[in-house]
Image (cartoon, helix red, strand yellow):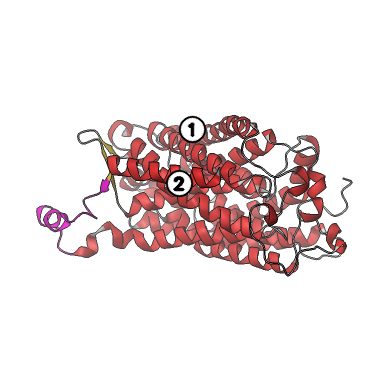
Amino acid sequence: ILPAVCFVWQIAMIILFGVFIRYDEESDAHWVEFKREHNITSDIENDFYFRYPSFQDVHVMIFVGFGFLMTFLKRYSFGGVGFNFLIAAFGLQWALLMQGWFHSLDPATGKIYIGVESLINADFCCAGSLIAYGALLGKVSPVQLMVVTLFGVTLFAVEEYIILTLLHCRDAGGSMVIHAFGGYYGLAISWVLYRPNLHQSKRLNGSVYHSDVFAMIGTLFLWMFWPSFNSAITDHGDGQHRAAINTYLALASSVLTTVAISSMSQKTGKLDMVHIQNATLAGGVAMGTAAEFMITPYGSLIVGFCTGIISTFGYLYITPFLEKYLKLQDTCGVHNLHALPGMLGGFIGAIVAAAATESVYSAEGLINVFDFEGSFANRGVGTQGGFQAAGTCVAIAFGLVGGAIVGLILRIPIWGDPADDNCYDDEVYWEVPEDEESIPPVLEYNNHMIHKHQDM
């Protein structure tokens, strides 16, 4: 079924691209004429040169960052990085179409015109489904992941249109539309796909020394490039500049509080690699919405400070709680890195927007930062704050409801998902080299997500 899905869906993409997708005026051969007509003097004015560095960074985050972050399982590193690669490559094509239909369909010609910013947005759109994959890691088949991505990208395009266009929220780094949505989408699917006998694969649900090192590569790529992620589609000029600075500071701050809480949580004061791989990134997630606002540098540090603590607490207490009482199996802990910090980021953005004043932003600055133009020209900052909060709720609702529906589709027994005693194992879907076929039983205690002393 996997070859059929890949071939048929890719051919469908070719046909749909043929019908709908064309180069925009900045990537078309008519650029020479366009330049002359608009009195553009130099090629450097082409959006490519503004956006491409950001696009490269985001692209690295999607394929290297997300991919390697998911290699922490001792026998699922091929699946982590390989399936991430597969669904992102499919997702970005589908995203160009879905986002094009919602955001940039030209009513006169019926075509979608794409440029470098469309590529960044398509990568963002994929990110929602890759986050959802984190909650399902090791428990689903590649075909199920393709289905998750097909619906995830579709839902993303709809909720993004509602939040950014209809509610007119600002969400440059996607705390709401990417992280809150993707996190709750994955959690809802995982909840519907609950496996009561997953403990049969317990010996593989953990890391070994080198798999944690590989995951750390993903962490560092994400960490380094998150300022680009949050600033990639902000306004040229001060918005982009400010978003990068704010994110840079929040990320740095969350590292120190993560290390502090991780060390405090163990009687011996030792650090847990899970926390360092994940919670150190929470500052970037929570900064996604407010990054382009005038939150001030120390405000960014406070956001990072708090989210590092909250995210690490999530790994220590919330994940075991969700698993035990809500029957929610979250392999990577996306609740703590994406869902919860994304929701917080949305509300932080709402508060910062509502507190905006003319003395801080200037009259023109307010109009520029919040796009108080056209039919939104009379909107005040308080109203904007309210809509920002509403947007966060829309994202969460889309994630939970959409995820529950997709989960039900994935429960139909036709997708070739692994048996309960065969999860977290690359053997099911990959040719694995012989050398380390068996896992020594000594490693059984080293369970990656469940607290060491927790009664199973």
Within 10 Å of disc 2 (Cα), the crowding (few <14, some 14-19, many 20+) is few
Which class describes the residues within 10 Å of circle 1: few (<14), some (14-19), or many (20+)? some
Q: Position of residue 16 (x, y in %)?
A: 34, 40
Instruction: Decide: is 239 above or below 44.
Output: above
Is 311 magenta? The answer is no
Amino acid type, residue under disc 1 in the picture: Gly
The residue at which mark 1 appears reads as: 386
Q: Where residue 374 sits: x, y (%)?
A: 28, 34
Indicate whether 260 appears above or below 83: below
Q: Residue 84, how many percent across, how many down?
A: 55, 53
The magenta span reads: 22-42
Nearest the viewer among 104 and 190 is 190
Q: Nearer the viewer, mark 1 or mark 2?
A: 2
Q: What's the amino acid at mark 2?
A: Phe
Secondary structure, mark 2, is helix
Residue at position x 49%, y 51% in the image: 88
Q: Position of residue 184 (x, y in %)?
A: 61, 39
Mark found first going from the N terminus, 1 or 2: 2
